[in-house]
Amino acid sequence: MKNNKYVLTYGDAFVDYIATNTTNTSFNRHLGGATVNVAAGVSRLGIPSSFITITGDDETSTFVRNELVREGVDLTHAITMPEKRVSGVYIHLTPEFDRVFASYVNETPDLQVTEKQLNAKSFEQASGFHFCSGTLFHPEARATTRKAIELSKEHNVICSYDVNIRPLRWESEGHCRQIVMKFLPTADIIKLTTEELAFLMKTDSLEEGIERLSGNAIPLVFVTDGENGTYAVFQDQTIHVPVTPVQPVDTTGAGDAFMAGIIRHVYLNGFPTTQQEVIECADFGNRMGALCATKAGALTAMPRIEEMTDGREV
């Protein structure tokens, strides 16, 4: 990616309401959402980050915007619509103190960033554009995502796509699979987990899943596999990049941290052209995800550049 530009991320901002104890009667409020985590994660790594989203004018939306600004994320291209209400996710604690998804609240699902609200000039100054499947299940957001991809292509902006499937947000598994796969060939970089690969390709075989995925002619694919590291698919070759083992505390934001690491590496070094460059890129992503998993929370656990470099340049 080109220096002196920013990374554009498009998606929904959420508020995570996380129970403070196992009675699940009181909650702490945190900024959340996969694309939010990536936008903030990129910023924490010292890369200019701008977020395209829609919020309202109520107190919750103000909280979201203030938190994003506090993370150093630019909101120049974000939309404010008074009647919009930011979605909320309620997370309960089990007696064993494990976090479980309890409920999802979205009062205004049809209020989305529209194609016409996208600022074409914002892509002229972008180095990368990132999105997740969270903007694909709603027709309006899906059309906006497609338009954003078109603008990225027009301005030679590297496009990354984290599959990040959330089945409960889709009307059916079949519809989810169809739409998510339709967007695979639009991106330069794809990231998905081994579970998501199995779901999309309808096979439990990693090798067969990668082979089927390769038919989409994606320049660079990262298949993450937790403690087993990452499988990078590049120029018809599959490269296993191991990760240093850690004692996980909470893996909630590990995938988003991985993605932020990939984006940073490509921003600073350009799109990989050799297997060694792919390995270095995946290794940085692996280390980001692993470090994130050693702390509780998602965005709160997102590593900062100082933690990743120990004062060294990378």
Image: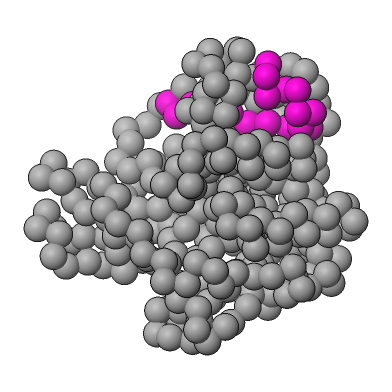
Query: Considering the image in quadrants, where does the C terminus appear?
Result: top right
**Residue 47 location, x and y as percent?**
66, 59
Instruction: Inspect the magenta stretch and tell me whether residue 257 lies in it.
Output: no
Vertical relation: 62 (above or below) 249: below
The total of numbered circles placed on residues is 0
Q: Is residue 114 left or right of residue 72?
A: right
Q: Is residue 118 left or right of residue 80?
A: right
What coloring was used for the rendering? one colour
Give the image quarter of residue 251: top left
**Residue 72 location, x and y as percent?**
57, 70
Magenta stretch in the rendered image: 211-227
**Residue 190 location, x and y as percent?**
67, 37
Instruction: Inspect the magenta stretch and tell me whether residue 217 lies in it.
Output: yes
Query: At x 74% / y 68%, what residue is drawn?
Result: 115
Vertical relation: 54 (above or below) 276: below
Residue 258 visible in the shown view? no
Query: At x 40% / y 85%, what residue is drawn?
Result: 59
Give the image quarter of residue 50: bottom right
Is 15 in front, or is 67?
Answer: 15
Query: At x 67% / y 19%, what residue is drawn?
Result: 212
Q: Is residue 217 left or right of residue 102?
A: right
Is 239 in front, or is 79?
Answer: 79
**Residue 22 location, x and y as percent?**
11, 54
Is 244 in front, or is 237?
Answer: 237
Query: At x 71% / y 62%, what residue is drawn?
Result: 144
